[in-house]
Image: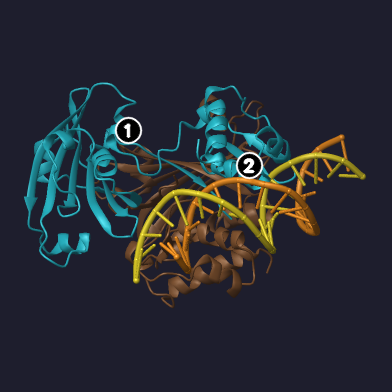
Chain colours: A brown, B cyan, C yellow, D orange
Amino acid sequence: MKNKYLSIYDEIATQIKSGEISPDTLLPSENDMTVRYDTSRETIRKALNLLSQNGFIQKVRGKGSIVIDVNKFDFPISGLVSFKELAQKMDNVKTIVSELSLIKPDANMKRQLNLTSNNSVWKIGRIREIDGEKIILDKDYLIEELVPGLTEEICADSIYNYVENELHLTISFAKKEIVVVEPTAEDRELLDLDGFHNVVVIKNYVYFDDTTLFQYTESRHRPDKFRFVDFARRTH
Amino acid sequence: MKNKYLSIYDEIATQIKSGEISPDTLLPSENDMTVRYDTSRETIRKALNLLSQNGFIQKVRGKGSIVIDVNKFDFPISGLVSFKELAQKMDNVKTIVSELSLIKPDANMKRQLNLTSNNSVWKIGRIREIDGEKIILDKDYLIEELVPGLTEEICADSIYNYVENELHLTISFAKKEIVVVEPTAEDRELLDLDGFHNVVVIKNYVYFDDTTLFQYTESRHRPDKFRFVDFARRTH
DNA sequence: AAGTGGTCTAGACCACCAG
DNA sequence: TGGTGGTCTAGACCACTTA
C-alpha cells in the first residue's frame, strides 16, 4: 500500500465492477469518505476524479457522485492497450512472427522516428490469427539502441511487457491515427482478406517520459474484424 | 476571471501554441510559479496537470515540466468534436439536411435510447459535402421530449450548439465506436462512393450529466476521406 | 545536498441542489 | 437552509534527479 488515493480508487472501482455498488445510486459524500477512509478531502477527491475520468462515476455539483452502469458501456479501451491485453479477452488467438530484423532506416523512417544518426532499427512483422483466420498484420519499428536484445519469443509475447518490466523504461503517452486504405501486396499475401477491398490501418506513435519517440507501429486489420471503442469525458 | 487554475492553464497553453515558449525547454518550477502567479502550489499543479492531460507538457519527477512540440503531433481531436468544429478547419464544406422527421421508435431503437414509453424520436439525416463530393452521411436520433423544436436551420448549423446554448442542457460524456461495414443501399444513394466497397461507421452515444442517454448518432464516411486521431496519456 | 515534482493534510469559502 | 461538490490555501514530508 503506497498511494492512499490509488488504494481508495481501486477499492471503489472493484466494488462498482462487481456490482457490489449498484448503478444509478449515489456514493457517500466526500465528507463521509474522509471519515470512512481516515484521510483528507483532497485525497478522496483525487480518487473520485480518477473514477470519473475512467467512466465509473459521474460527479454532479450539489448532488453527489452517481455510479455509472459500467456493463452498459462495455468499456474504455482507449489508451495504451496492447494486443496481448485484448487477446486475453478472446479465445483462439495466435501470434506468428513473420519478420524480425535490423534494418538501416530510409529517409522516411528517419523522419518518423526523429533519427539523425544512422542507428539501426528493429523491423518486426507479426500476424495475429483469430479463430484460425489471419486478421491483423502488426508492423513495428523500434530504435535498436533503446531496445536491445529483442528475440522472437519476446515478440510473440508482448513487447510492452519487455520494455516496461525487463528494460524498466516507462512508456508515457501515445498518438493513434486510424485510416482505411487499399491493401498492399504484402497485406494480400499475409492476411486472409477473403475478398475484402480495404484494410484498416492504425498508426501508433509511442513516446517515452522524456518525449522522445520510441516506437512506430502500424496495425493492419481486416475491416470486418475491426472495432475501436473510445470513451470521452468532457473536462471543462 | 473566475477559475485561477483555468486562467493559468489558458495563459501557458496559449504561449506554447504560439511558440512563445519553445518546445523541449523546461517550464519554471512549481514553486517559482506560486510566486509568479501569486497562488498556492496545488493551484499551479491543477493547471499543470491539465496541460499534461492535453498534451502540452510532460511532467518528470525530480526534473521539471518539459514543453512538448505541439505542432509535431497535429492534435488531440479525441473527445466531443462536432462536425462544425472540424469543418472550420477546412474550406468548401457544405451540409445538406436530407431528412428531419419524428418517428415512433422500433424495438431496437428503444433499446439503444433506453426508452420505455412510446416517446417520439427525431430522425435526422445530414449529408456532408467536402469540395463538392458527398463524403459523410450523419444519421442522428434524439428523444423529442428532451430536445423540442428542432428545425432544418438548426440541423444545418450545429445541434450541439442548440442543445448547450439554447436549451442549456449539459452534455457530459460520450462513447464512440468505429467499425467498417458494407455500404447500405442508402449509402450508395446518398454518398459519392466512387466505387469504394466499404464505409467507416462511427457510432456515437452522447449522455447528459445525469447519465441518461440523450443522442445516438451514426456518422458514415467514405473510407478514403476518413481519419481519426487519438491522443492517449498514461494515467498511472 | 539542493531542487524538482508527487502526495497528503486541515482548514476555508463558494456555487449549486434539494427539501 | 443544510448538504453537496468545486476551488483555494499554507504548510509538510517524500522520491527522484542532477550536480
The answer to whether B113 appears left or right of D19 in the picture is left
The answer to whether B134 appears left or right of B11 in the picture is left
Discs 2, 1 touching: Cβ within 8 Å: no
Distance between mark 2 and mark 1 Cα atoms:
30 Å
Can see residue A148?
Answer: no
- Inspect the image, locate mark 2, and give the three-letter code of the amino acid beneath it: Ile
Q: Residues within 10 Å of mark 1 (few under 14, many from 20)?
A: few
**Residue B154 percent coordinates (x, y):** 17, 36
Q: Chain of mark 2?
A: B
Q: Chain of mark 1?
A: B
Identify the residue position indicated by label 2 in the image: B44
Identify the residue position indicated by label 1 in the image: B85
Depth check, front residue: A161 or B31: B31
Q: Secondary structure at mark 1?
A: helix
Tag 1 or tag 2, which sits nearer the N-term? 2
Select label 2 or label 1 by which is in front. 2
Depth check, front residue: B7 or A177: B7
- Inspect the image, locate mark 1, and give the three-letter code of the amino acid beneath it: Glu
The answer to whether A107 appears left or right of B141 in the picture is right
